[in-house]
Image (tube, rainbow, N blue to C red):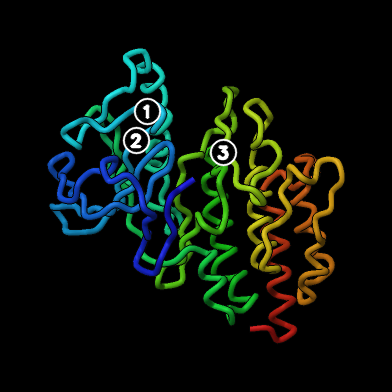
Amino acid sequence: MWDRKWGENGWQMAKDNEYIWLPKGVVLKDTYRIKRKIARSNLSIVYLGVCQKTGEKCIIKEHYPAKLVLRDLNRVGVVWRRPGLKGTYLQAQAHFFKEADILKDISSEYIVKYIDHFVQNNTGYIVLEYCPGVTLEQFIAKEKNVSITGFLKDIYLPLMKALEQIHKKGIIHRDLKPSNIVIKKNEKPVIIDFGSAMDYRGTEHKQIFVTPGFSPLEFYSKTAKQGRYSDVYSLAATLYYYLSGKTPLDVSQRIIDDQIEDIRSLNKIISARFAKVIMANLAVDYRKRYSSLGRLRRAVRFEYLRLKLMGYE
């Protein structure tokens, strides 16, 4: 988990061991200068940087698996905790760079943009677009008067369009949630953090990344089949969160006795038909969900038009 929260001016830091972070002013690849620390997880560290050639801000993600490496005495490079960990570390670095490989082949105004990636200081770096704004989670909390029709048309449908684009490439995001969606100052949504993304057509074991309430059951397993329907679950959970103000009951608590509250009991504005669509795509069994986003997108558009005709703005 990240030791951070998103504020109006970007990532806000939690207290941490100062020695772990790269110092302010360090220049990477003779191009990207570290401006300040932002956040860290067990696998990587994130900084706000600036491109010295253009003057534009950027996000710099450093591969730093805390269980495998330590910061070198020069405070820039990294060293393995034990010589025998080198092979494990290199495997982890290859996985780290998958995010760059995925993003560099995607062009969408609703997906964070890839800029660069490289190896330096005995570790890896990914440089991404800087997206000033707030997370969807904070946007919902702050904009109490955001209309349901505005949400569906200007935020939710664009998110679906972006996801359909990556799904066509055989990629699933695997970590869709309100905190991984940034609402920019022009109120356009941008999906960030593709660190968990993968080609769902592969057969290799998956790393386990879960967020309670937003992850489907198959994300709790290294071997379970995963596909577009997995992102559909997370997208339905995000819609449930917007409509109810509540995180859906975690799937791990629903396996034996499913006590998740029906969204219709929490929001009377939506139609019973639309509520059934949302709950169907929150099914524990992936076979009961929509296999792709097409049907869900049509249901969202139909509900949007219905609400507009009823006078909701």
Question: Foreground residue, 246 or 272?
Answer: 246
Asked if residue 167 shows in the view, the reply is no
Task: Kindly report the distance in space between the C-alpha atoms of the residues bearing marks 1 and 3.
Answer: 17 Å
Task: State the count of labels.
Answer: 3
Left or right: residue 12 versus residue 263 is left
Residue 83: where, in percent of width, then height? 32, 14
Mark 1 or 2, nearer chain start: 2
Mark 2 or 3, nearer chain start: 2
The 10 Å Cα crowd at callout 3, few under 14, some 14 to 19, many 20 or more, is some
Q: Is residue 43 above or below residue 130?
A: above
In this view, the residue farthest toward the right is 257
Residues at badges 1 and 2 in contact (C-beta under 8 Å)? yes
Q: Which residue is located at x 38 percent, y 39 percent? A: 44
The 10 Å Cα crowd at callout 1, few under 14, some 14 to 19, many 20 or more, is some
- Label 1: which secondary element: helix
Instruction: Give the residue type at disc 1.
Output: Gln
Mark 1 or 3, nearer chain start: 1
Task: Kindly report the distance in space between the C-alpha atoms of the residues bearing marks 1 and 2.
Answer: 7 Å
In this view, the residue farthest toward the top is 84
Asked if residue 298 shows in the view, the reply is yes
Left or right: residue 156 versus residue 263 is left
